[in-house]
Image (cartoon, helix red, strand yellow):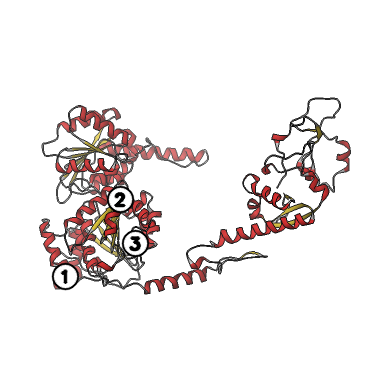
Amino acid sequence: MEECWDDEEYTPPPPSNAYKESVYVPPGKRVSESGRNSEWSSNRTREPYRNQDTDSWREKPRGNDRQFSNRGRKQYSHDGYNTNSAWKQNGEATEIEIGSNFVGKVIGRGGSKIQELERESGARIKVLQNDSSDETTPIRLTGSSESREKAKHLIEELTSNFGRTSITNEGSDNSWYGNSYMSSSDDGPKLIDWDSLNKSCEEARQQKLAALPPIIKEFYFEDPAVAAMSPREVSAFRASNNAISVVKINPDDERPIPNPVSTFDHAFQHYPELLVELKKQGFTTPSPIQCQAWPIIMKGYDMIGIAQTGTGKTIAFLFPALVHIVGQVTPRSQRLGPSCLILAPTRELAQQIEVEAKKYTYHNITSVCVYGGGSRRNQIGIVTKGVDIVIATPGRLNDLVMNKIIDVTSVTYLVLDEADRMLDMGFEPQIRKVLLDVRPDRQTIMTSATWTNEVQELAARYMTNPFKVNVGALDLAAVHSVSQEIIFAEDEDRRNLLNEFIANMGPNDKAIVFVERKSVADDVASDLLLRGVECQSIHGDREQCDREQALDDLKTGYVRILIATDVASRGLDIKDITHIFNMYFPHNIEEYVHRVGRTGRAGRTGIAISIFTRQDWMHAEGLIKILEEANQFVPDELCDMANRYRAWRRKKEAEDAAVGGRRFRGGGRSRRF
């Protein structure tokens, strides 16, 4: 460590003939006090040093009398001399060595720790430059023998404690992270024995599981007609129902894939109460995802459901959950907490799942929705009374679990709904924290609209040999019951096109108008209200009560127009939405698919109209794929725009490569939601 001067304390003297001009010597040519170059010493006259308090001139401290700038300001006696210089004169020096990784700990922030050690020991402590290739750094201790010994003891104690606490997690609640796997000795800290650590962790986990009541997962009784289906009949049924495909994530899994069901009786003939509830809601046949998901989940297997929005994924995991809750060994009154936990990315989706859960009365199963923005006191009051199903957003759930309000150790049925959206919103840390307390032998269901690498990693981490049920193409696809129209326009034409669209709405039409920013949503809604058009708005900055009121007004028909940001692109299940108007095209194609999915739900048809400007050209290629997959008309202008963008991108990449390989970032405007 190279020595440096504290520039705050040194003021150059005024010009005078009494003193010779000082000579600068590079640090590399300086030598220690004991081996000073005699020629340099004889030819150089010491420049004066001025004490600012006494206005007296003294010689500038040199050699070991100089201090590090990270020790703070120098201290001087009444006569202007550095008081630390007496340490060198009145005592001897001792050098010790410490690990180079401990140097920062010894010095402390701003030199605070080394000053504390000097005051406590009475010795002067100086960190020297390490010229050798080893991983140690010398420290010089100057002063009396007692002070040097005390300073040595303090430094050894400091580095020893630092090694234990920073590596071994001493004091952790987990017994397998104790000092038995990491200790400090004269030879330095020892490495962690990960094999022993993992073995102890697994043993502790097995002991904990052995003390828990068993989980009953299988509740499926295959109908004889379903069991009698031949492989050809199974393949034909899946192909005719939106191209259902089922694969095993683990290729070594030898369990047979259950055949799909075609009626509600095939799935729930042994649960007549559920059949009654289904008839009350007016359902006639299961949706494609339900046909294949119910046999798999009721067999007790983990499942990943990949399907478009509005295809009945909620009922696909909710009905087996009701059967699972009632069928466990431990009576519901004796369970420490909820038996079913459903995680959703947004408040609106969580509330929508709660609405669906409360539609069906099965053995008096109770549920609660906990989410940020809602009344925490009311949510805690309901939870503490005891519930069977907790539907939650990750943030609020983590809050209640950390404060020991919700006990998730009794959860045996876990659902991660819209997993891809939760990952996009950065909820994986909260999910990981919560699932640490959920028993690992649970049954886990995951739903997603896409099958990205991130979703695959999440499934591999939290699921056990799952089956993946895919409805439709694995690529992004919009609901086929929606007619998609593209309007090419300039940026300043958006308001006129919106006004024209509203003027042509029928008396029974309902529409969601999507914009790009919260401020734009407020601006558009205010403008429409001033013109006498009844509407509501929803975005992330609105209070939760206002968001709920906006959705309720749209559902009841009090308003027929909702101005929204992408916070409403998922989780809204308002079945009579007839139109989606994308006043601003979304920032990616995935959000476009989810926006379009807000209409054409539950067997209905819908229309999606999107304004497409020149700034949106980077989405043209992806939009073409969506339109072609849904058998929609593809405008020639869109194809031309995609070709121009590809040509511009190739040219840009070539230019960037020629000037040093700058990373290509795409074109168009940046967006903020």
**Amino acid residing under circle 3:** Asp
Tag shown at residue 297: none
Tag shown at residue 407: 3
**Lower position in the chain sequence, tag 2 or tag 3:** 2
Mark-to-mark CA distance, 1 and 3: 39 Å
Image position, residue 551 (x, y; %): 21, 43
Mark whose residue sits in front, 1 or 3: 3
The image shows residue 223, relative to residue 151, as above or below, that is below
Q: For mark 1, what is the residue?
A: 226
Q: Quadrant of residue 238?
A: bottom left
**Lower position in the chain sequence, tag 1 or tag 3:** 1
Q: Give the SS element for disc 1.
A: helix
Residue at image location 19% in from the left, 56% down from the top: 358
Observer able to see residue 515? yes
Image position, residue 131 (x, y; %): 73, 52
Image position, residue 226 (x, y; %): 16, 70
Tag shown at residue 377: 2
